[in-house]
Amino acid sequence: GQNIDQPTEMTATEGAIVQINCTYQTSGFNGLFWYQQHAGEAPTFLSYNVLDGLEEKGRFSSFLSRSKGYSYLLLKELQMKDSASYLCAVRKGGGTALIFGKGTTLSVSS
Amino acid sequence: SAVISQKPSRDICQRGTSLTIQCQVDSQVTMMFWYRQQPGQSLTLIATANQGSEATYESGFVIDKFPISRPNLTFSTLTVSNMSPEDSSIYLCSASMRQGMGEQYFGPGTRLTVT
């Protein structure tokens, strides 16, 4: 079986830092992905971790621990436009499709 | 990266009819996939579109209901057959390069409403 868990909703204020956690239990692992999806739009790629550690890309960072089946997405200096759903997804094997968690809806307020 | 387009962007269809959604990628990609996203939900994988052979369907999805074609490396179609209101959803085409080891990109989606 497979299970990808992330919080349903989170709230934060402009300028703050927020961490969105994702835990996974899958029958294989070949990478963990984070996507951002604004309402009514397609998911856009944010980050990709295949090895343990932190990947930093501007205001967004993503961390992976394969032994713990755990990842997080860190968003710094939050802006109103960061209000969106954040989707955690796992690739179980090379050449296979991503399997998505249910997504975390982040609301950023002023 | 890959740019993915889908047609139509949206449609309203009658119960019992079928709709074919087209997906075009601007470069040759290794893998193509079809997902469904129901209102307020996350993405559910329907199938992997295999070039020149039958698609590989996920549990709960069958070829008779969702026939898929992929005649070449840049194009795929998904048909939603004998539609019912439960098929109202956003259907997304997706593609990955580098033998499926790299990033996976998404098309803008097709918003389907069945009345």
Image (cartoon, coloured by chain):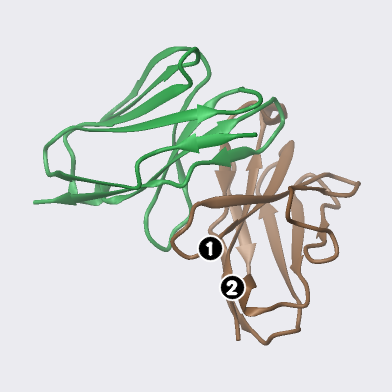
Q: How crowded is the residue under tag 2: few (<14 C-alpha within 10 Å), some, or many (20+)?
A: many
- Determine whether label 2 and label 1 are within 8 Å by CB: yes
Q: Position of residue B42 (x, y in %)?
A: 49, 52
Q: Is residue B85 left or right of residue A21?
A: right
Q: Is residue B1 visible?
A: no
Q: How crowded is the residue under tag 1: few (<14 C-alpha within 10 Å), some, or many (20+)?
A: some
Q: Position of residue B21 (x, y in %)?
A: 70, 66
Distance CA(mark 2)–CA(mark 1): 7 Å
Q: Relative to residue B14, is residue B56 depicted above or below?
A: above
Instruction: Give the residue pinned by disc 2.
Output: B88
Q: Relative to residue A75, is residue A13 depicted above or below?
A: below
> Toward the viewer: A103 or A95?
A103
Chain that bears disc 1: B
Q: Relative to residue A84, is residue B112 depicted above or below?
A: below
Instruction: Give the residue pinned by disc 1.
Output: B38
Q: Is residue A25 left or right of residue A75?
A: right
Q: Position of residue B26 (x, y in %)?
A: 65, 48
Q: Secondary structure at mark 2?
A: loop
Q: Position of residue A97 (x, y in %)?
A: 66, 38
Q: Which chain is brown?
A: B
> Toward the viewer: B98 or A108?
A108
Q: Is residue A11 visible?
A: yes
Q: Is residue B97 left or right of residue A110?
A: right
* Image hue for chain A: green
